[in-house]
Amino acid sequence: MNQLIQNLMGMGGMTDQVIATDFLISAKAGVRNYAVAITETGTPELKAALREQLNDAIRTHERITNYMVAKGFYHPHDLSEQLQVDLTITDTALKLAQK
């Protein structure tokens, strides 16, 4: 465990990118889950509450996306640039696994 912590600490800004990516993936899942829940519920009060939560989840997704774009972690409109980011992350993960 100490080796893993030492490796992560040596990653510097990469740790922020990993956390932000995990947060973005969770936000996307939340949006999907709320949308499905809205279609499955029958009471207007519950639909309204879920719709409010869905809107919050969409705003959270937008904020984390904007943060990641500003930091250069995410390039949703430039697939070749995003591929390079993904390859760098993959290479780092493979190197950590070998240590």
Image (tube, rainbow, N blue to C red):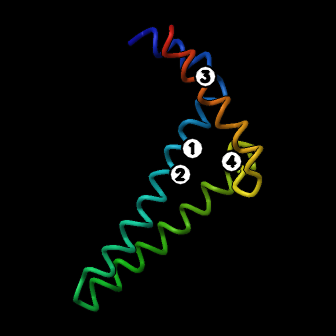
Q: CA distance from mark 4 to mark 3?
A: 16 Å
Give the residue displayed 61% in from the left and 16% down from the top: 10
**Residue denoted by label 4:** 74
Q: In the rendered image, which quarter is residue 43 located in?
A: bottom left
Nearer the viewer's eye, disc 2 or disc 3?
A: 3
Which element carries disc 1, helix, strand or loop? helix
Q: Pointers 4 and 1 in contact (CB under 8 A)?
A: yes
Q: CA distance from mark 2 to mark 3?
A: 20 Å
**Residue denoted by label 1:** 20
**Residue denoted by label 3:** 92
Give the residue displayed 46% in from the left and 9% down from the top: 3
Type of amino acid under label 3: Thr
Nearer the viewer's eye, disc 4 or disc 1?
A: 4
Q: Pointers 1 and 2 in contact (CB under 8 A)?
A: yes
Other-residue count near label 3 (Cα within 10 Å), few / some / many at <14 / 14–19 / ≥20: few
**Residue denoted by label 2:** 24
Residue 42 in percent (x, y) is at: 22, 88
Q: Going from the N terminus, do you reach mark 4 or mark 2 first?
A: 2
Q: Going from the N terminus, do you reach mark 1 or mark 3 first?
A: 1
Residue 24 in percent (x, y) is at: 53, 51
Type of amino acid under label 4: Tyr
- Residue 17, compared with residue 77, is above or below; it is above
